[in-house]
Structure formats: C-alpha cells, structure tokens
Image (cartoon, rainbow, N blue to C red):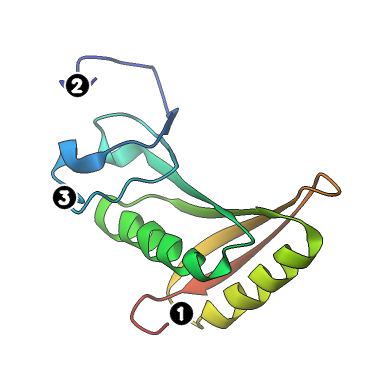
Amino acid sequence: MDDGEVDFGGPIIQAEVDKRYQHCFENGKIPDFIIHIPNNTNGNLVVIEFKLASNPNSIEEDFKKLVEFKQRLDYEYLVQVVIGDSSSLDRARERIERLATNNGERIIIIKFNVETWTTEEWEIRYDCNVA
C-alpha cells in the first residue's frame, strides 16, 4: 500500500496510521482511526480520536491533532469520541465546552455512556490559536 499499487475501490478505515510516509507529522502524530482513500489526499474523509472521559484534560491534545489533520491533509470531518460513565462524561463535556471557540474547525463530539450504552452527539468549533 505504501507504494500506491493497491486500489480498494473507495474509502477504507484504518487504525493508527503513521502518516510519516506522506512526509507529514514527523513528530509522530498518529490518529486512532482514519477513513480515507489510501495514497490520495483528495479522499481524506474522517479522522477519529478516542478518549476516556476520566482523562478530560488530554482531550485538548486530541483536538489539536484533529485540527492539524484538517489543515495539513484536508480531512473533511473531525470526530472526537469520549467514552465513560455519566459523571465522567459530564465533567468531560464541561471541559470540552470551555475549549470551544466561536471560530475554528468544526469537531463532532460523540459521547458514549458505558452505563446506558447510549450515545449523544454535538459539535463545537475549536481554534488552536485561541484555546
């Protein structure tokens, strides 16, 4: 696949892809999942990060990584999945809301509650230069 000789016929999902092969992110920024057309920057659809709600302070690092993938590789959608129980999800949402800005890149947030096995979705704008 690194040689660009494989054609999957459309987008695929890949876990923890090291994008250094595209001469990007030499600093080792590896997303949890990407949905893209390999070796084609026009097919970059979604970059997804997962985080435990019990660690809300590290969510901002994921936001920075998501925005960098949008700005450098033109991913269409940025998604942050936050997993936890009700109380940790509430704390994580408070932290996320404090990080939101009026402008910046759109990030879709998906909360997954492990107690009820339900999800909630909302979105924020995030600007690395403001937060």
Q: Residues within 10 Å of mark 3 (few under 14, many from 20)?
A: few
Q: Residues within 10 Å of mark 1 (few under 14, many from 20)?
A: few
Where residue 118 appears, as percent x and y from the top left, is 81, 48
Kind of element beneath mark 2 = loop
Q: Residues within 10 Å of mark 2 (few under 14, many from 20)?
A: few
Where does the C terminus fall, quadrant-wise? bottom left
Mark toward the start of the polypeptide (2 vs 3): 2
Kind of residue indicated by mark 3: Glu
Mark toward the start of the polypeptide (1 vs 2): 2
Q: Do residues under tags 1 and 2 come within 8 Å of each other at their CB atoms?
A: no
Q: Do residues under tags 2 and 3 come within 8 Å of each other at their CB atoms?
A: no
Q: Do residues under tags 3 and 1 come within 8 Å of each other at their CB atoms?
A: no
Residue occupying image coordinates x 57% and y 70%? 124
Q: Mark 3 and mark 1: span between their CA atoms?
A: 28 Å
Kind of element beneath mark 3 = loop
Where residue 81 appears, as percent x and y from the top left, is 59, 52
Q: Which residue is mark 1?
A: 103
| 87 over 98 or under it: above or below | above
Q: Mark 2 and mark 3: span between their CA atoms?
A: 20 Å
Q: Can residue 100 be seen here?
A: no
Say which of marks 2 and 3 sits in front: 3
Q: On residue 70, which mark appears?
A: none
Q: On residue 4, which mark appears?
A: 2
| 119 over 63 or under it: above or below | above
Q: Which residue is mark 3?
A: 26
Kind of element beneath mark 1 = loop
